[in-house]
Amino acid sequence: MIHHDVSHWPLAVVRVDSVPTTKENVLAFVTSQRAMLARREPFIEVADALDASVIPAVERRLLADWVKESNDQAKRLCVGVAVLVSSPIIRGAMNAVLWIRSPEFPLHVCATEHEAVTFLSRAAEDDGRIPEAPALLRSWSRRRTG
């Protein structure tokens, strides 16, 4: 299941857990992403897939359609995305796909939370529009690890 949290804006956290993702869940996620982009404010995003289950084909297609639909807005507003993936095989496959078709914003597939925080902090520093990003990311990391 996909969870979307923008309560620490401009940090958005997407978490994919072990509960199977449904079409309704993907559509709710897309609705929340649309609302996020409608703010027309720069943001950073952590996509935490460390505990993710496999997303079925129909739902993957809906997500792919959303990525295509939102590309123009995302390239203007997205300062960076860090995707947390535990499996080295999946990380390798994702990186191979990204070599073929890179998004128009900084994206990094990460093995650890520390790597995600470091990447997004640097992306925000390079971009300059979210000076509070490092503090937000440190706070998220502390909450996540409890």
Image (cartoon, helix red, strand yellow):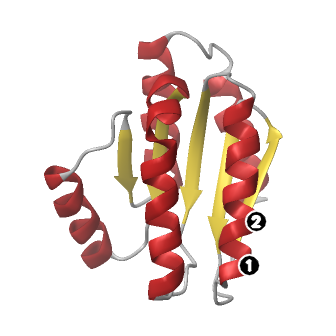
Mark 1, Cα crowd under 10 Å, few <14 / some 14-19 / many 20+, is few
Q: Is residue 79 visible?
A: no
Image quadrant containing the C terminus = bottom right
**Label drawn at residue 119:** none
Secondary structure under tag 2 reads: helix
Q: Residue, x 75% and y 52% (percent of image)?
A: 32
Q: Is residue 65 visible?
A: yes
- Residue at 51% over, 22% down: 124
Write down the residue under mark 1: 24
In the figure, residue 59 lies in which quadrant? bottom right
Tags 2 and 1 touching, CB below 8 Å: yes
Q: Residue furthest right?
A: 7
Measured as percent of width and height from the top left, residue 98 is found at 23, 53
Residue type at mark 1 is Glu
Residue drawn at x 46%, y 61% is: 65
Which quadrant, please, contains the N terminus?
A: bottom right
Residue 24 higher or lower than 80, as above or below: below
Relative image position of residue 75 (x, y in whole percent) = 44, 30
Amino acid beneath label 2? Ala
Q: Which residue is mark 2?
A: 28
Distance of label 2 from label 1 (alpha carbons): 6 Å
Tell me what residue is drawn at x 42 percent, y 51 percent. Answer: 68
Labels in figure, total = 2
The percent position of residue 129, horizontal first and vertical second, equals 58, 12
Q: Is residue 17 above or below residue 141?
A: below
Label 1 residue SS: helix
- Whether residue 67 sits left or right of residue 129 in the image: it is left
Crowd rating for badge 2 (residues with CA inside 10 Å; few <14, some 14–19, many 20+):
some
Image position of 94 with respect to 32: above or below: below
Residue 90, how many percent across, how many down?
31, 75
Q: State the image quarter where residue 10 is shown.
A: top right
Q: Is 102 on the left or on the right of 119, as rendered?
A: left
